[in-house]
Amino acid sequence: MSALFLSRLTLSHFRSHKRASLDLDGRPVAIYGPNGAGKTNILEAVSILSPGRGLRRSSSEDMTRRPEALGWKVTADLTSLSQNHEIEAWSENGASRQTKIDGKAAAQVALGRIGRVLWLIPAMDRLWIEGAEGRRRFLDRATLSFEPLHAEAVLSYEKAMRERNRLLKDMVRDAHWYAALERQMAESGAQIHRNRTHALDLLSTAQDAAETAFPTATLSLTHSDPACDAPKDPDALLSAFAGNRSRDMAAGRTLIGPHRADLGAIFAAKDVPAKDCSTGEQKALLISLILANARALADDFGAPPILLLDEVAAHLDADRRAALYSEITTLGAQAFMTGTGPELFAELGESAQYVHVTDENSVSQTTQA
């Protein structure tokens, strides 16, 4: 199987780091140091080398180092499917993020064509017990990892929906004003649904085919209204939008469609919904899904993705940590992992590289094992 990894990563005026540079060889990367030292900032820098807003969903202005506020830059050398690429991402004075691939300006979606990045951060721990929006975002990140053009379908749908919502709030009743917008929403919405269901199929297959120490989840895609039970059909979705217009007008917003979808998960071994599981079980289910996503991508893309696992080791006992590290090394993924001390990564031994981040945001590579 081909490899996907960063061989060099450089941060300039990014978050807390005035300058940091790492030389990497494809092994997992264990990043350790005290809380607040800037470990997660390194993971965030890697995350913006993929389409989207990064693992914190922050603005470009928020990523710039203070008090200078000069802007920031992240550069990386990426080996992907036996090809080498140079990636640059930067922002000047809080302006929108810009990207270059191999010296040429590129749209963010192009990053998804040459690499894949998945992450798990502490903010996701409440995924199963909070609102549907976070679960949709989780599913769309997984879907985007398989289909980079998924982002364009989502943007097209959301743009048309914003325009439709304006008409609804203004109590515009003339159907002609809605026709083109609802057609765009129906076509993009149907594509979104097809992409999501395909991603769920891939995730489920990857779970079923693996021997893993982590629990598996039975996954489903649900919608808030029976009218959208079959949104893969653009014509049916178009009819649903038109038929629901009066209800939408009363609410001042679009009440049905893929933007109201939810990701359902049931702890398969116990037949218990994820929202009713213990905190430890919910975390284990999340890790299981990330690993399943990675295994599926190894087959679909041709190489395992880069993994960003923030503080994941702190929530696992020694056996589960060893199982996680074993799955990562067996998969051959370059996983960036953070923790407060090197002892959290002892099970990795020499199969990982080690990076020490201090309170002064000093970043040094060590031989700690």
Image: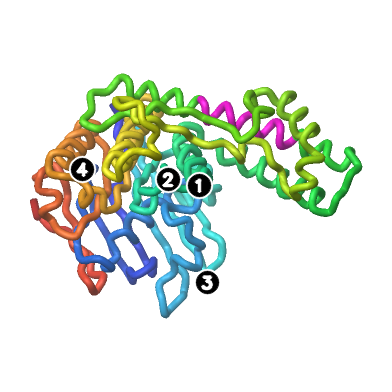
Whether pointer 1 and pointer 3 mark residues with C-beta atoms closer than 8 Å, the reply is: no
Amino acid type of disc 2?
Ile
Q: In 3D space, how far apart are the residues under numbered discs 3 and 2 (Cα atoms)?
A: 38 Å
| Tag 2–tag 1 contact (CB < 8 Å) | no
Residue placed most toward the observer, 297 or 114 = 297
Give the image location of residue 113, x and y in percent.
Answer: 47, 37
Q: Position of residue 331 (x, y in %)?
A: 24, 31
Q: Residue at x 79, y 47 (%)?
A: 250
**Mark nearer the N terminus (3 vs 2):** 3
Read off the residue under disc 1: 131
**Mark 4 or 2 closer to N-term?**
4
**Residue annotated with mark 2:** 129
Q: Indicate which disc, 1 or 3, sits on the residue closer to the N terminus.
A: 3
Residue 5, can we see it?
Answer: no
Q: CA distance from mark 4 to mark 2?
A: 34 Å
Could you tell me which secondary element the residue under label 3 belongs to?
Answer: loop
**Image quarter of residue 275:** top left
Q: Is residue 127 left or right of residue 99?
A: left
Q: Between marks 4 and 3, how big is the CA–CA gap?
A: 35 Å
Residue topped by disc 4: 27
**Amino acid type of the residue tagged 1 in the rendering:** Gly
Q: Name the amino acid, label 4.
A: Arg
Q: Is residue 310 visible?
A: yes
Q: Secondary structure at mark 2?
A: loop
Q: Quadrant of residue 195?
A: top right
The image's mark for residue 283 is none
Give the CA separation, mark 1 to mark 4: 36 Å
Q: Which residue is mark 3?
A: 93
Residues packed near mark 3 inside 10 Å, few (<14), some (14 to 19) or many (20 plus):
few
Give the residues drawn in magenta, as a range.
184-197
Crowd class of label 1 (few under 14; some 14 to 19; many from 20; radius 10 Å) = few
